[in-house]
Amino acid sequence: MKPIALNKIYNDLLNCYGKQYWWPGDTGFEIAIGAILTQSVSWRNVETAISTLKSKGLLEPELLNLKSAEEIAPLIRSTGYYNQKAKKVKNFLNWLHGYNFSFDCLKKIESSGLRDELLSINGIGPETADSILLYALSKQFFVIDAYTRRLFARIGIISGTERYSEIQDLFHKNFNGTIQDYNEYHALIVIHAKDVCKKRSICSKCCLKDFCKANIIYLDDSARSEKISKKD
């Protein structure tokens, strides 16, 4: 399968699910905190933590920065590994303080340099950094997550063992889209992987089944089962 199919996959997913208008969050800061908290946990758990922080009036960077990691931890308990995540939030806030807590200032920084700075923050990896860059700062970086690996490995475009940067380069070089398209594509991958291309996929309901390698296997298995049942 040629990498250029990335554009067709996007259009097929968009036709199937429609625009998702993702990522949740009223401000760039809220989106960034959500990106940190959603590491290794479902978004539902993050929503609980975000609601708690909002109820305390702490979703302003200057105010949250006044709190210690020990004070933040119980407020984000629902996200799991909350002590470690509280430290990650503080690390991010310490870095953000250098830019006067201004996301407008961050948007003016050259994209690759800003990404390097985010990756230098203890607790911020490529997926979290790119989520902040794309969703909070409107920088054109494709977010690669476990859903992306699973879906495109099954389709046959990747093996699934590539490094993060290799998969991201594939999208950057072969997907012709705007920042908003990057946003939508990642959201569509997530909803498709959650609803259809699960750990145990439902290939019969997949809008990508016509050219998916995994579906060929599914069809072969179905045909084999049908032959066996006829013999019985």
Image (cartoon, rainbow, N blue to C red):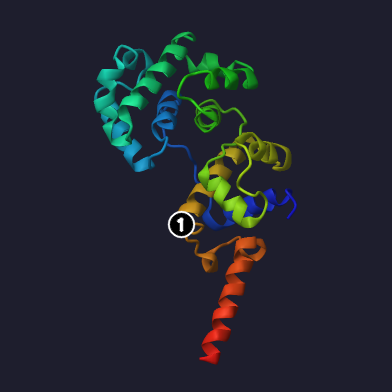
> Crowding near pointer 1: few (<14 within 10 Å), some, many (20+)?
few
Residue marked by disc 1? 195
Is 151 on the left-hand or right-hand side of 92? right
Q: Is residue 115 above or below residue 201?
A: above
* Residue 177 in view in this figure: no
Q: Identity of the amino acid at label 1?
A: Asp
Q: Position of residue 48 (x, y in %)?
A: 29, 36
Residue at 55% x, 27% y: name it: 133
Q: Position of residue 200 (x, y in %)?
A: 47, 61
Residue at 42% x, 29% y: name it: 36
* Residue 164 in view in this figure: yes
Q: Is residue 154 above or below residue 28?
A: below
Callout 1 secondary element: helix
Quadrant placement of the N terminus: bottom right
Residue at 57% x, 73% y: name it: 221
| Residue 171: quarter of image | top right
Is 108 on the left-hand or right-hand side of 169? left
Q: Position of residue 110 (x, y in %)?
A: 64, 17
Q: Is residue 164 above or below residue 150?
A: above
Q: Position of residue 90 (x, y in %)?
A: 38, 17
* Total numbered badges shown on the rendered structure: 1
